[in-house]
Amino acid sequence: MQEQVSAITQFSNWVGDVGGVVWGPYVLIPLLLGVGVIMMIGLNFVPWSQILKAFAVMWRGRRAAAGHEGELTPWKALMTSLAATVGTGNIVGVATAIMLGGPGAVFWMWVTAAFGMATKYCEALLAVKYREVTPAGSYVGGPMYYIKNGLGKNWKWLATLFAIFGMVASFGIGNMTQANAITINVVSLAGGDISSYISKSLVAIPMLILAGVVLIGGVKRIGDVSGTLVPIMAFIYVIGGLIILIIHIERVPEAFALIFDSAFSGHAAVGGFTGSTLAMAVRFGVARGLFSNEAGLGSAPIAHATAIVKNPVRQGMLGMLDPFLDTIVICSISALVILVSGHWSDDVASAGTLTAVAFDSAMPGGFGSWLVTIGLVLFAFSTILGWCVYGERCVIYLFGDKGALPFRIAFTLAVPVGAMAELTLVWNLADLFNGLMAIPNLIALLMLSPVVFKMTSDFFSNPDNLNNDD
């Protein structure tokens, strides 16, 4: 048994080392941020200047315009994307970033999101422009399709590479990490032993059944569930966090000062916090930022490609709301509550319970831990649903429509595996495959950026385009 544990630990450490190289200062971090900056400048800062109009487009997208093609309304396509992005990254991921990178990591999460708005705008636009319809009538799109159809046959190998990475990553970032976080928090809230396989199985089995009921129904059932679940739970979580911040309003300026000061200098050891450097703040802030909002990862455009919409720019405008809602709003709530509570420097058992401890201590009546646990369960469960769509579309690209149902079954069966897995290994795998997915997608975005810039310029040169649904 000891040899088995040792082998697992060694493998986890190896995965973490490889992930460290991928996420290091010479590979993904400059590529991710660089593409976001290039896209934002090339778009003349449209994602920032047009954000209010994007919310108007989102509101009108609750209903599909007549005569347009697709599977889900623009609203449900966005909610499916948000279902996949609003998950453990908003609760556990934020806590992990603070514990490993210090409060300054929050600033770098914001930077990733701010420029990630441009990245996601481009992803969603290209997903609709280059999408295809399968023989079974599924609207499929995303990086593998805009690489193949936008860059040409000489780049099909890059599209295939992304699809392989996406298929594998869906079991990590979109399944096992979510199931693991759900299990730890539910068991902890119930006062059970998080190291007990019996306690974990009591959560894993119902989760398996619920996931199977929804996932086997396919993208339309997932869209229906996400369209209802995500906005309700996000609203409840944000309101709960705002109540805490209002109660402790005198500590909020100090929390912001801590974030900005640590962002450029790291943070010395204090309490149970072991300290962090500037490099650690950047690395874990950007890594958890991408884990949370997935800007540049290439996953969200797979959902946006299903939208019933005619003009790709309009869905691009919904795509750019992903990072804003996910990171600038929801992640910031989690981070500020953790910091104003003061528990970020305590010797807390794990990042999986830090946010719950912070909310519980800061919210009167002991409702905080319940709010976080229920929020995490629903967010993480919706993420499992959204990532099933992503993985399925990658499988369809690789093997055709016949691979969809077997994938859904395998994806469902992976839920209890993640629930019982060791957290460090799961997170390390998620980080690694995040990076492996992002690299081919970001390369494609750079090469197709002239297409995006021209379509955007043409669209916004005519103000009437924002006032109709064409």
Image: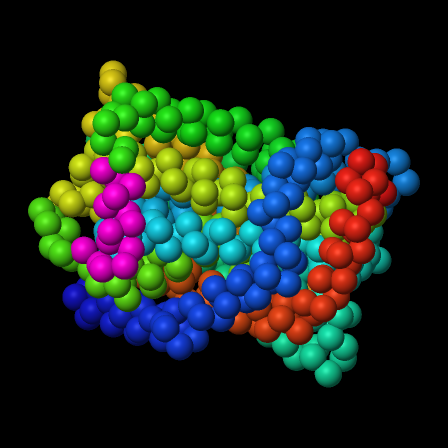
Q: Compared to 433, does 390 lie above or below?
A: above
Chief secondary structure of the magenta span?
helix
Q: Which residue appears farthest toward the left when viewing the image?
A: 271
Q: Which residue appears farthest toward the right when viewing the image?
A: 67
- 33 or 380, nearer to the observer: 33
Does the magenta-highlighted stretch encompass residue 264?
yes
Residue visible at 32% across and 41% down?
335
Residue visible at 11% across and 55% down?
269
Residue visible at 9% across and 47% down?
271
- In the image, the segment drawn in magenta is 254-267
Query: Residue 339 location in percent, x, y?
Result: 24, 39
Q: Which residue appears farthest toward the top when viewing the image?
A: 365
* Residue 320 appears anywhere in the view: no
> Considering the image in quadrants, where does the N terminus appear?
bottom left
> Considering the image in quadrants, where does the C terminus appear?
top right
Query: Residue 35 location in percent, x, y?
Result: 55, 66
Q: Compared to 313, does 153 lie above or below?
A: below
